[in-house]
Image (cartoon, grey):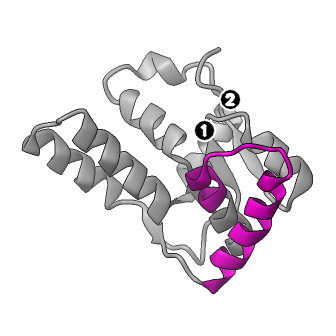
Amino acid sequence: MATDPEASEVVLCDTSFISRQEASLRHPERLAHWSRAVLERLDAAVLAISVFSLAEIRAGRIHAQWGQQRADAQEARLAAFLLVPLDENVLAEYSVLHAWALGGRARNHNDLWIAATAIARGIPLASCDQHFEEIARDHALHHIYLPATP
């Protein structure tokens, strides 16, 4: 993974993408159906994570009652991501997305926060969740969709 955000594209990674990427450490074949061009793009990018994805990942780990060693190993992998904080720009984009969702488009609030983070920063969002495509159609979200299964 690249380390200089000024020299490389920054891509925000959704929880679903990070989870699949992590699972591929044990089962690389799970990503074999992803486009080589997209994988090369992601390999060259600075991978970022929102505070909402980080919270989802940690909550999942707590719920699954991981041991300390496994949790520490995951935290070490997560430390390689650029952490994108919450700020007024993200808040403004979230408000727009939340109002849009109130119009009959039920969405998980964390997914709205994650999409808002990508939109506010003007960076693409990599995820395995196709429902981000609807947000991308109606808002300034560039979604890199990586299907979970072939």
- Amino acid carrying label 1: it is Leu
- Indicate which disc residue 35 carries: 2
For the stretch drawn in magenta, the main secondary structure is helix
Q: Decide: marks 2, 1 in contact (CB < 8 A)?
A: yes
Residue 115 placement (x, y as % from top left) = 68, 57
Label 1 Cα neighbours within 10 Å, binned few <14 / some 14-19 / many ≥20? few
Camera-side residue of 44 and 95? 95
Disc 1 target residue: 39
Residue 130 placement (x, y as % from top left) = 72, 33
- Name the residue located 18 percent from the left edge and 45 percent from the top edge: 71
Occupied quadrant, residue 123: bottom right
Q: Is residue 89 left or right of residue 133?
A: left
Range of magenta residues: 88-114
Camera-side residue of 119 and 126? 119
Asked if residue 104 can be seen in this view, the reply is yes
- Count numbered badges in the picture: 2
Q: Is residue 69 left or right of residue 114?
A: left
